[in-house]
Amino acid sequence: MKTRKYFLTFGLVLVSVVSTYFATTSTAQQGAPQSPPAADLEYQVAAILYQQKAAEYRALCYQAFNLARWQLDADFDKKNLKKLPKAERERPRAVVVDIDETVLDNSPAQAFGVKNRRAFNLTDWYAWGERRGAKAVPGAVDFVNYTVSRGVKVFYVSNRDDVQLQATIDNLKSAGFRDAAAENVLLRAGGVSTKTPRREAIAQKYRVVFLMGDNLDDFSDAFERKSVAERFAETDKTRALFGDKFIVLPNAMYGTWENAIYEYGRGLTEAQKAQIRANALESY
């Protein structure tokens, strides 16, 4: 009788241990970040190398920031100010800049994805941000610090997630942007990608002299989620604003321009994207 009771007790303990093991293992697997499937991103190599190795890329960046400085100086001309309504003249000036590929260079993160065959994913992107290792885009530090020296507020409006705020501020400061702080680094909150509410909040207190970015979505929601043809048409319609209210930085590595080619399709494989890119090429 004692032997039977012993085996019964042992069996119950064994079942409990095994059940706990499988339940724990299953939970751990569900909560662990899933590695992205292997991705052939070789098509991005030329764009990354252009940003990292081409003097022409640097020249385009310097050109953009030189133009921005000229526009800022011109805004202080009293003749130009007289053209504005009195209410606007009395508001303090501000300049709005995007962060990624506008003032910070993330090409090493893109190169990591290519070398390790890993498509964009938040695990890698957050890890890169925590390194605080992005360098400044050529010309960006001199322009921003000059802007601040003239008493103009600079707002960094980015679609980095708000959980990256401190790492982003630290990286901006280490790259030379001394004014970066929680009050003027405005990241995405609640998964809302459009920047319009943030731009509007700034415009309520400041007169935005101009905006700078590498993506047309950085300037107006008129460009958001539009087809290639619609983006062309909107750009042509607002051509007078470029170099005046909108100043664009070069970025051939990624952006809404590529999403538009895929027609914003979700769940596309790399092979499907490759076929779409091939079909989109205009040849003779």
Image (cartoon, rainbow, N blue to C red):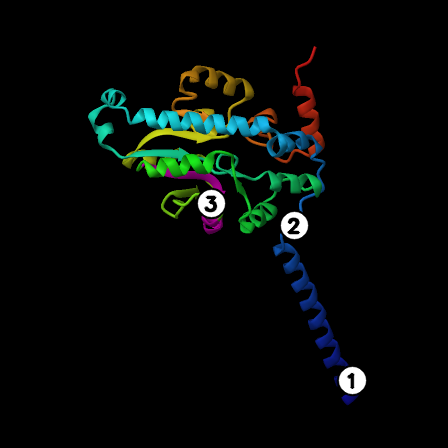
What residue appears at the point 27 percent right and 35 percent down from the top-left corner?
92
Q: Which residue is mark 1?
A: 4
* Cα–Cα gap, marks 1 and 3: 70 Å
Query: Within the magenta stretch, is there residue 166?
Result: yes
Q: Residues within 10 Å of mark 2 (few under 14, many from 20)?
A: few
Q: Which mark is residue 34?
A: 2
Q: Residues within 10 Å of mark 1 (few under 14, many from 20)?
A: few
Check the image and name the residue furthest to the bottom: 2
Relative to 4, does residue 79 appear above or below in the rendering?
Answer: above
Discs 1/3, front: 3
Residue 275, given in percent of the width and then of the height, sits at 70, 25
Q: Which residue is mark 3?
A: 172
CB within 8 Å, label 2 to label 3: no
- Of the image marks 2 and 1, the number of the one nearer the N terminus: 1
Horizontal side of residue 142 vs 260, given as left or right: left
Q: Say which amino acid is labelled 3.
A: Leu
